Image (spheres, helix red, strand yellow):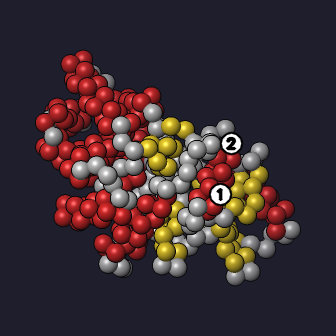
Amino acid sequence: MHDERLDQLEDWLEIFFDDADFTLSKASDDASFRRYFRIERSNLSFIAMDAPPEKENAKLFIEIANLLRDNNVRAPKIIDADLEQGFLLIEDLGNTTFLQALNKQPRLDLYKMAIDELVKIQTINTENQNLASYDSVLLMKEMQLLVDWYLPKNIHQDQLNQLTEIFEILITNAINSPQVFVHRDYHSRNLMITRQKISVIDFQDSVIGSNTYDLASLLKDAYFELSATEIQALLAYFYQQADIQTAFTDFEKQFDLMGLQRHLKVLGIFKRLSLRDNKHQYLDDIPLIEKYILQIADKYPNFIYLKDILNLTKVDQ
């Protein structure tokens, strides 16, 4: 199939470079409508982002990238932009993701680096910034994806009522924890290792929300499983580095419940990516997400209903 937007991107790059002396290759897949291409020219490399303006907000990407960089967080430098067409040319932070580095370097050392960077991110002054609030409406909208896309359509009303009760508990937990800058996808595929330092990408959906959200994304990652012992050690490390003032047991519960909110949402997103967008590769990550959810259902009596509700998907298959 002919790719008209790719043609337009190449035309735009030719104007920027003043010639066509470059090579273009696919850099990565994305769960959104964005696409990334690596541009190589004269022993230099860049990343071109294709962000269709009717579906993606490239202007917000630029604003958040600059905000992060202004606060000494390594994010890609914006080299050029055409917001009308939805094209960006940005710094190439390399091709080694955090996930890839986990197979080559001591695991806990890498995670501590990521936590140190997260603590720095959470000190960003969010006043007067163009960031949405991770409020009850957005939290509920996200969890509704579980119902709309993941669970069978014939789910009983009493089970929907049980889910609503769970959703309300999770919302209360999220909005009553300290509110900070939230990357919103701070996990192993959105962190890069650049000259032995952490760089962040895919931050355009950042909001102001719970200080445990990004931590849950990192330590209970959809794409990589840490042991319970490792999670506990890293949770304690964040607690100390971020100087959390609440009791550790209360903080741990906030973390667990925030992770549950995220994982309920992710189940809906991964199923939607398959059904709506023909991106079926995310289905392979669903068993780990379900495992995280069932662990919390076992740990906290309020969520025991989730076991039966998730089992509905097995009966429906």
Q: x and y percent of residue 133 in the render? A: 50, 37
Q: Residue at x 28, y 59 (%)?
A: 235
| 74 versus 29 height, above or below | below
- The image's mark for residue 53 is 2
Q: Residue at x 70, y 56 (%)?
A: 88
Q: Which residue is mark 1?
A: 66
| 67 versus 97 height, above or below | above
Marks 2, 1: nearer the viewer: 1
- The image's mark for residue 261 is none
Q: Circle 1 — which element?
A: helix
Amino acid type, callout 1: Asn
Q: Residue at x 52, y 72 (%)?
A: 95
Amino acid type, callout 2: Pro
The front one of 208 and 308 is 208
**Label 2 Cα neighbours within 10 Å, binned few <14 / some 14-19 / many ≥20:** some
Q: Quadrant location of residue 36? A: bottom right
Q: Residue at x 75, y 60 (%)?
A: 80
Q: CA distance from mark 2 to mark 1?
A: 20 Å
Residue 3 shows in this picture: no
Residue 240 shows in this picture: yes
Q: x and y percent of residue 226 in the render? A: 26, 63
